[in-house]
Image (spheres, rainbow, N blue to C red):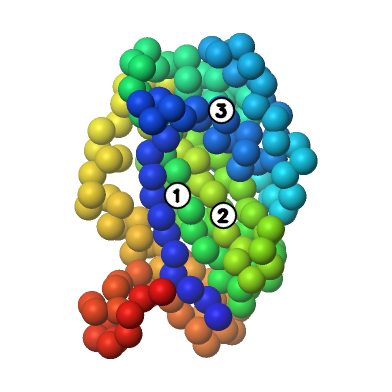
């Protein structure tokens, strides 16, 4: 049965993390980290069935190359505690077919992130058939034909995250409706919905 799940996190150097390593893992890819001079290799990872980079129309062509994209992201940051990327994980409704899940993901990412100026690197994982889910890695800086610009601090607002949580439910429910499925998801807590159950 379809469940609601959207989890957001920041990928930060301050916590010893790398956008390049994260992107390589999520895409089951091999990416050389120019800054650290090492490879991050996850080509043997199973269950990654779909991956794509979505970007604003005015972004440089190199953003569609995963290695160039995330090396540019890391190169744009000088601080040792820099926030290099944002990531969201979403559960995909099992009631939708694989192509329908891709269409749902692309619509949500395009409308909520790319139209605001972010580059999004998405990957659908099916390592557990009962839990198809998508990883959405997002850039934190504005971008134009010349490359990355300033940090977009407004993308960190709690209100924006709440909007994204709501929009994921609306978008998923729209696709479930179009697929003639009766089930719906709700981003609100059980308490807010008036349901007397403990969340699992």
Q: Badge 2, how many Cα within 10 Å: few under 14, some, many 20+?
A: many
Comes first in the chain, label 3 or label 1? 3
Q: Nearer the viewer, residue 198 or 98?
A: 198
> 38 above or below 12?
above
- Name the disc covering residue 88, or none: 1
Outermost residue to the right: 44
Query: Quadrant of the image for the C terminus?
Result: bottom left
> 50 above or below 142?
below
Q: Residue at x 48, y 73 (%)?
A: 3
- Tell me the element at label 2: strand
Comes first in the chain, label 3 or label 2? 3
Residue 179, percent from left and from top: 60, 78
- Name the disc covering residue 134, or none: 2
Q: Quadrant of residue 93?
A: bottom right
- Name the disc covering residue 52, or none: none
- Name the disc covering residue 20, or none: 3
Comes first in the chain, label 1 or label 2? 1
């Amino acid at each position: 049965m379809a469940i609601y799940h959207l989890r957001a996190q920041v990928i930060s150097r301050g916590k010893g993390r790398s956008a390049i390593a994260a992107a390589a893992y999520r895409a089951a890819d091999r990416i050389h980290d120019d800054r650290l001079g090492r490879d991050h290799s996850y080509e043997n990872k199973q269950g990654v069935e779909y991956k794509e980079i979505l970007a604003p129309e005015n972004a440089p062509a190199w953003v569609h190359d995963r290695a160039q994209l995330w090396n540019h992201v890391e190169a744009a940051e000088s601080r040792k505690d820099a926030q290099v990327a944002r990531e969201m994980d979403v559960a995909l409704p099992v009631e939708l077919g694989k192509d329908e899940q891709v269409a749902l993901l692309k619509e949500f990412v395009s409308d909520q992130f790319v139209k605001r100026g972010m580059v999004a690197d998405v990957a659908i994982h099916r390592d557990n058939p009962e839990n198809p889910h998508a990883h959405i890695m997002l850039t934190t800086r504005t971008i134009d034909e010349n490359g990355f610009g300033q940090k977009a601090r407004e993308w960190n607002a709690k209100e924006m995250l709440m909007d994204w949580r709501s929009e994921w439910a609306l978008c998923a429910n729209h696709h479930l409706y179009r697929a003639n499925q009766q089930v719906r998801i709700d981003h609100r807590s059980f308490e807010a919905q008036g349901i007397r159950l403990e969340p699992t």
